[in-house]
Amino acid sequence: MPHASENTLTRLYENMVTARYYEERLQEEYLEGKQPAFDISAGPIPGELHLAAGHEAAGAGVCDHLRDDDIVTATHRPHHIAIAKGVDLKRMTAEIFGRETGLGKGKGGHMHLFDPDVNFACSGIIAEGCPPAVGGALAAQKRNTDSVAVSYLGEGAIDQGAFLESLNFASVFDLPVVFVIEDNDWAISMPKERVTDVENGAKRADGFEMPGVRVDSDDVLDVYDAAGEAIGRARDRNGPTVIEVQVHRRMGHFMGDPETYRPEADQEAAAERDSIVRLESDLREAGVEDDRIDEIRDDAHSRVDEAIEWAKDQPLPEPGAAHEDLFVSPASGVTDSEPDFEAVGGEE
Amino acid sequence: MTEHNERVAVQLDEWPDDVESDEGVVVNWFVSEGATITESESLCEVQIEKVSLDVYAPASGTLTEIRCGEDDEFERGETLAWVTPTPSED
Amino acid sequence: MSGAESTRELTMSRAMVSAIAHEMRENDDVFYMGEDVADYGGIFDSTQGLREEFGYDRIMDVPISETAYIGAAVGAAQAGMRPIAELMFVDFFGVAMDQIYNQMAKNTYMSGGNVSVPMVLTAAVGGTYNDAAQHSQTLYGTFAHIPGLKIVVPSTAYEAKGLMHNAIRDDDPVLYMFHKRLMGIGWMPAPDGPKTPVPETDYTIPFGRADVKRDGEDVTIVTLGLHVHRALEAAETLASDGISAEVIDLRSLVPLDTETIVESVEKTGNLVVVDEDYRSYGVTGEVTARVAEEALDALERVERVAVPDVPIPYSRPLEKEVIPGTEDIVNAATRTQ
């Protein structure tokens, strides 16, 4: 492997199997009580659930280059990215289960995870994470730090104004931001060919005078290399980049998506292109013993199981907590009294 | 009460391929017991996992009995209701 | 129900779809644009089966570009067609608000009535299934605030069909807000009530005509959408406590049927307004103000039951705390006595 050390390979692998197993376990938990018919209000996990099995390479390959002070905004399908960015797994899981000790005290939910310790945030609205990432990059530039921002979006989001405006803004001010498009071919039921004429999302960069790179190999190391270059450019203050990574939607748009609109062949093809399997063979080629691979995987699984068990043990929030946290300052602002007009230098 | 051998069973024609479950739930009835119905009109909607399907009238006549009401579970092949066909004119 | 009659009942989604299909058969200028409306049939079943009958040309899946396709609906309407555009969740209005607020709502007025915008914007609204702050709002007040949009909110299948026929035939822009919990979707079971008998023929329900869903003497409960059913349930409980509640379903926010509300308050003296939108600057305040303007003397007590001014939280106990429940309505009505 010319481009990554054995350490990097094992780190990526650990990250990706954690993310995959996390989604498998959440799927299991989420479907509890939803058989034989799917009632969205039944079972231990509230609300909708968008799982990212098949997207792992885009999370791990990019975020491996990031530090805690680098900013990431993710999408409505955020878990693998959060895991790769180092978001607290237990508190994230507690949030997904709607518990008091969750990242947002049960107020946010799985599409709205915020972990300021590692500068991670996500939004449930398509492409709306792009402008805040640009703003994070703007702050880094203004403060003259070398931190960068990464904005994730799906291929369906490349037709949104928020994305296109963000590209222009980032380009004209040379901001240290990388846009990572996760192309899983489907915007819910809409195949990408039917909603965009561009050959691939990376081409969107062309109109904004910035590099656009597409990775279509299911090889996390290719993602890792492309991201390394883009993030390096950003850190060196050489401007923004668009990277599109071909990923695969293995679990439907949301849990319980019947996917009746999706040809079976497409589902099968997606299932076969698995970057985790590919990375396993790379690990073996690099001389990593099977026992070691199993050990990494088992450790990752234990960590996930532990986080889920912990989360399920956490208390639900008190109903009254719903009224808190709207502001961090008092409603009156920094003061609750108004000075005498003359005392602040005014003259009658 | 009509003789059983005259009745026609209301059943889901085809179980969907892409579900694992052998059970479903009736989510909506569009007609009530005693209603006059026309062959092939949609009588109720069932849900298997997250797939929704309509169940159609097997014959014109009267919906004499609903065996699986709304929110009731049923198994593959189970009879959801009985229709007593209108006697033919000729 | 004594069952000899063939009383066909429809879910709200099927009633809505039957009106759209009818209008599309009658008028080639009607077409539908939205995300996942073709093969999927609408995430909340708003277009089930329409693509099969009308094809992709008239049931158009569009890119995730709300500004473009809602604005395109405005333009196509001004060019004489009758487009229906769908916002998958009303919460997504933010990415396209200019087209709604500054074009769809204002072009008729700014043209001195020389331009008309005969389009329908449909939008799924509401919570109760833990979809959290960005996917659970109703935003009734946000849209009703801007002049230039007619706004309807059906609460039953019968109304969903009649209001949709009127919305498509009307020469002005109509925002048609359907509550997800009322649609009768298999995976989101509806309460009892929205599934009703629906005539097979086409019929129109006028905008600005509230419906008294239950007669009463002691207190007037004014509401809309999902909360019509919660108010009716509350009225049952209140009746067993000896309180006779009248329940008014607004059915449209613009125009607002002040007359029916005032008449009722003149009879009962007490007003409870129930809304699934935020409390401040919204439907509860507006209805109360209208009654105060028209019949201050008749008004003895007022109660507002609405979402306290916080975003809709995710966790079940938190969401339940902020979205008005039947018990909240019972308590408010009881306090007026």
Image: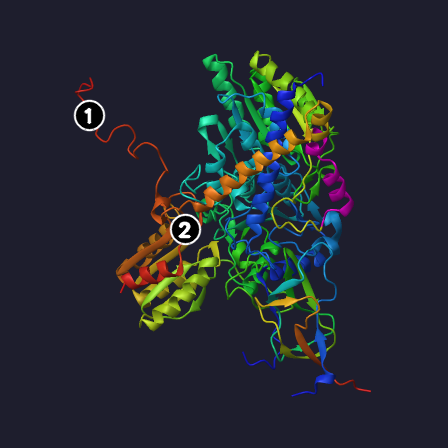
User: Which of the pair C152/C278 is nearer the observer?
Assistant: C278
Instruction: Give the answer, above or below, for where A222 lies relative to C254.
Output: above
Can residue A235 be seen here? The reply is yes
Q: Which residue lies at the image location 27% right of the left edge and 59% below the top edge? A: C301
Q: What's the chain of the residue with tag 1? A: A
User: Which of the pair C209/C177 is nearer the observer?
Assistant: C177
Left or right of A155, for residue C261: left
Instruction: Give the answer, above or below, for where C88 lies relative to B40.
Output: above
Whether A270 is among the magenta residues is yes
Q: Position of residue A282 (x, y in %)?
A: 72, 26
The amino acid type found where label 1 is placed reads Pro
Q: Position of residue C333 (x, y in %)?
A: 32, 62
Q: Position of residue C33 (x, y in %)?
A: 66, 46
Residue corresponding to mark 2 = C317
Q: Mark 1 packing: few (<14 Cα in 10 Å), some, or many (20+)?
A: few
Give the colour scheme shown. Answer: rainbow
Left or right of B38, for residue A14: left
Q: Which residue lies at the image location 51% right of the left edge and 14% below the top edge? A: A146
User: Which of the pair C259/C85 is nearer the observer?
Assistant: C85
Q: Main secondary structure of the magenta part?
A: helix
Residue corresponding to mark 1 = A339
The region drawn magenta spans A261-279
* Marking on residue B33: none
Left or right of B22, for residue C225: left
Instruction: Give the answer, above or below, for where B47 lies relative to B6.
Output: above
Q: What's the chain of the residue with tag 2? A: C
**Residue A208 lies in what quarter of the image?**
top right
